[in-house]
Image (spheres, grey):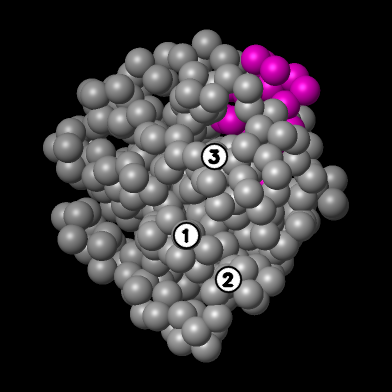
């Protein structure tokens, strides 16, 4: 069966559907990054969303599209943390039962926040693939609807609303950078941005400790990649061997993918803390990290998607201790 492609109209529909739940997030000019690069660099602050990440957009669009019967039976999802939080938030707001499946790799800070949402939390296995399998088991056994965290047209369209806001606030944009994992964000951004300006550069940043989308593209098909511990835990997780949408969409829309190491993620996190007084997670710092470490080529008008801020404060304190008092600029 041929699957319907996600188009620009779907993104506009998503914007209207999620408006009661999702705010238009700020686009902040970064004087510090602009001075460093000699370019205009803006930060799209998705960390200021209600659930502290961009993923509420896709979650809201998908859940609001469900039938009454599906809502009454309940929903389930698998997540490295942020998508689960968003699903739990929207479900609670709409009075829907939600079961969030996570692996043992999800950081304690995210687990504690998840527990406070009121959703049922089930910890399964050592990878997102294990959590995914359990989520589909619940669908088969209990009739719950699986809310896929990225490979779903409604989720992709919801994430694409970020692109609409970027174009509205900064129509001169020529380069957009964001962390790349399962590809829902870049697929949505690609639909919104590339259908408006095909020459705009869309760049993905992944962790070298388990870049499933990058490795799959190199292989020419979805493959399984072993997960490893990383500061950018939100970028972990497979793309699904039966990937229906995001693998092809990332290949279509993303111009370049760069891999970042742990020091580089730390550079971006500490830069954001020191220069903009914001605590963000490793995945959210990936665009900043890439610029600080000269990992990407950009145009003159750059937007970095700061995707979320779910990070254990002990991790940040440890990084600060390891700098021995040196600023980010001194260390790079």
Q: Residue at x 68, y 22 (%)?
A: 194
Q: Is residue 194 magenta?
A: yes
Q: Residue at x 39, y 35 (%)?
A: 26
Q: Are marks 3 and 1 in contact (CB under 8 Å)?
A: no
Taking depth in this image into account, of 106 and 42 the one nearest to the observer is 42
Q: Is residue 122 above or below residue 288?
A: below
Label for residue 42?
3
Q: Are marks 1 and 2 in contact (CB under 8 Å)?
A: yes
Taking depth in this image into account, of 234 and 115 the one nearest to the observer is 234
The first of marks 1 and 2 along the sequence is 1
| Segment tinted magenta in the rendering | 187-205
The first of marks 2 and 3 along the sequence is 3
Instruction: Tell me the quarter of the image containing the N terminus.
Output: top right
Question: Label 3 to label 1, Cα distance in Å?
Answer: 13 Å
Q: Please tell me whether mark 1 sits on a helix, a strand or a loop.
A: helix
Neighbours of disc 1 within 10 Å: few (<14), some (14-19), many (20+) = some
Q: Please tell me whether mark 3 sits on a helix, a strand or a loop.
A: strand
User: Can you give x and y, in whole percent of width and height, for residue 113 in the image?
Assistant: 26, 62
Q: Is residue 307 above or below residue 57?
A: below
Neighbours of disc 3 within 10 Å: few (<14), some (14-19), many (20+) = many
User: Can you give x and y, in whole percent of width and height, for residue 94 in the image?
Assistant: 18, 33
Q: Is residue 185 left or right of residue 75?
A: right
User: Can you give x and y, in whole percent of width and height, for residue 304 in the image?
Assistant: 57, 43
Label for residue 328?
2
Which residue is tagged 1?
Answer: 275
User: Can you give x and y, in whole percent of width and height, for residue 96 in the image?
Assistant: 19, 39
């Amino acid at each position: 069966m041929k699957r319907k492609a996600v188009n620009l109209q779907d993104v506009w529909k998503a914007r209207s559907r999620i408006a009661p739940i999702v705010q238009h997030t700020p686009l902040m000019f970064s004087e510090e990054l602009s001075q460093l690069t000699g370019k205009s660099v803006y930060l799209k602050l998705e960390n200021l969303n209600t659930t502290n990440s961009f993923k509420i957009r896709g979650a809201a669009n998908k859940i609001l599209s469900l039938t009454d019967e599906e809502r009454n039976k309940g929903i389930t999802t698998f997540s490295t943390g942020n998508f689960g939080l968003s699903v739990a938030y929207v479900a609670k707001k709409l009075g829907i039962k939600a079961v969030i499946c996570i692996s043992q790799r999800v950081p304690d800070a995210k687990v504690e926040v998840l527990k406070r949402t009121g959703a049922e939390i089930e910890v399964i296995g050592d990878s997102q693939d294990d959590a995914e399998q359990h989520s589909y088991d619940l669908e088969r056994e209990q009739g719950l609807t699986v809310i896929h965290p990225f490979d779903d047209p409604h989720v992709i369209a919801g994430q694409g609303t970020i692109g609409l806001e970027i174009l509205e606030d900064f129509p001169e944009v020529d380069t957009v950078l964001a962390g790349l994992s399962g590809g829902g964000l870049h697929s949505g951004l690609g639909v919104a941005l590339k259908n408006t300006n095909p020459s705009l550069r869309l760049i993905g940043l992944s962790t070298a400790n388990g870049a499933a989308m990058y490795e799959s593209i190199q292989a020419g098909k979805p493959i399984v990649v072993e997960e490893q511990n990383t500061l950018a835990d939100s970028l972990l997780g497979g793309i699904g061997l039966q990937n229906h949408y995001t693998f092809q969409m990332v290949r279509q829309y993303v111009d370049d993918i760069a891999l970042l190491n742990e020091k580089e993620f730390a550079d971006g996190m500490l830069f954001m803390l020191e220069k903009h007084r914001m605590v963000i997670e490793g995945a959210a710092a990936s665009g900043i990290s890439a610029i600080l470490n000269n990992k990407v080529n950009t145009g003159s008008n750059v937007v970095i998607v700061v995707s979320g801020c779910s990070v254990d404060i002990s991790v940040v304190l440890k990084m600060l201790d390891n700098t021995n008092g040196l600023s980010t600029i001194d260390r790079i």
